[in-house]
Structures are given as C-alpha cells and as structure tokens.
Amino acid sequence: MAHLDLDLLAWLPISPPERRPIEESRIRINSFLREQNGWVVEGCYTELLVLLKHEATEIIFMDLSVEQCILNAKNRPWEPHKYKTQEAEDANLEMLVSWIREYKLGSDAVSYQSHRNFYDAFQGNKRIYTENQANKH
C-alpha cells in the first residue's frame, strides 16, 4: 500500500517554507493516483483532500483532544523525509504545539471546522477516532 504525505505536496522545498500552487499539487496527486492500486493519504490540507474525495474508499478522522494531540506531537518519531535531523524537527515542536492549541478555533483549510465539514460531507466509508487506539485495551 503506497503512502502519500500531503505535507510533501503542500509545500515547496525551500526555506522559508512557501505553499506550492494548488494546480501543481493537483498534478502531483493525479500522478500518484495513476501509479498506485492502493494508497493511504495522510494530511490536514482540506483543499488537497477534496482533490481525492472521489477516489477515496474510506476516510478516518482523528478527532483527538488538544491534550492528546500535543502529547502525540511530543512523542512522534523523527520524520527524516521532512527534517534533516531529529534536532531540526524538535526545533519546530513549539510551532506545532501552538498550531494544535489553535486548531479547533480556526476556520482555514487546516482547521477543525474544515476537517469536520469534509468528514460530514464524505459519502463513502468513514470512521472517527477520539482517542489513540494503542491506548485502548
């Protein structure tokens, strides 16, 4: 099963980061879909998720508490495809935690409301998780 991280499609590989034009992301998504029989997409960019909605057979909405999301962020493994070192990733942690704290208050394409609206409108199979599944016994 192929994995596509929308972060890699949403941002240009430059510093400071800059959003990739949506049409360029669309082209990359369509190329990915043509090359894969089965796939999982991870990401929080609703404007990119919308491009996949007719191809998706199921969506999963991680509707965790702010506290659980922050704990997950602090315990996440290093993502070498995004950061050159663990230290570079950790340097971004405070920005990530700030974003998590504001997540349910925002109204943009990476906000809780945008994700909830996408989930509610999706016509295929869908699930919501309100807690980490590894913690369930």
Image (tube, helix red, strand yellow):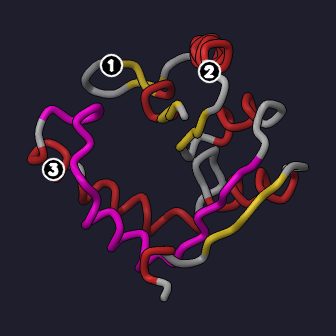
Secondary structure beneath dot 1 equals loop
Of the residues under marks 2 and 3, which one precedes in the sequence? 2
Q: Residue at x 58, y 64 (%)?
A: 62
- Residue at (21, 48) in percent of width and height: 78
Mark positioned earlier in the residue sequence (3 or 1): 1
Amino acid type at mark 3: Ala
Q: Position of residue 104 (x, y in %)?
A: 58, 68
Q: Is residue 37 left or right of residue 95?
A: right
Real-space Cα separation, disc 3 to disc 1, in angstroms: 18 Å
Tell me the magenta residue range. 58-84
Q: Earlier in the sequence, mark 1 or mark 2?
A: 1
- Camera-side mark, 1 or 2: 2
Q: Residues within 10 Å of mark 1 (few under 14, many from 20)?
A: few
Under circle 2, the secondary element is loop
For mark 2, what is the residue? Answer: 36
The answer to which image quadrant residue 35 occupies is top right
Indicate the amino acid at tag 2.
Answer: Gln
Classed neighbour count for the residue bearing mark 2: other residues with Cα under 10 Å, few (<14), some (14–19), many (≥20): few
Q: Which residue is mark 3?
A: 91
Q: Percent x, y for residue 46? A: 66, 42
Report how far apart the C-alphas of labels 2 and 3 lie in the structure.
34 Å
Q: In the visual, does 99 lie left or right of 74? A: right
The circle drawn on residue 13 is: 1
Seen at 48% across and 88% down, the residue is 137
- Work out whether residue 74 or residue 80 is closer to the camera in this orientation and state it: 80
Residue 132, x across and y down, in percent: 48, 74
Label pair 1/2, CB-CB below 8 angstroms: no
Residue 18 sits in quarter = top left
Question: Closer to us: mark 2 or mark 3?
Answer: 2
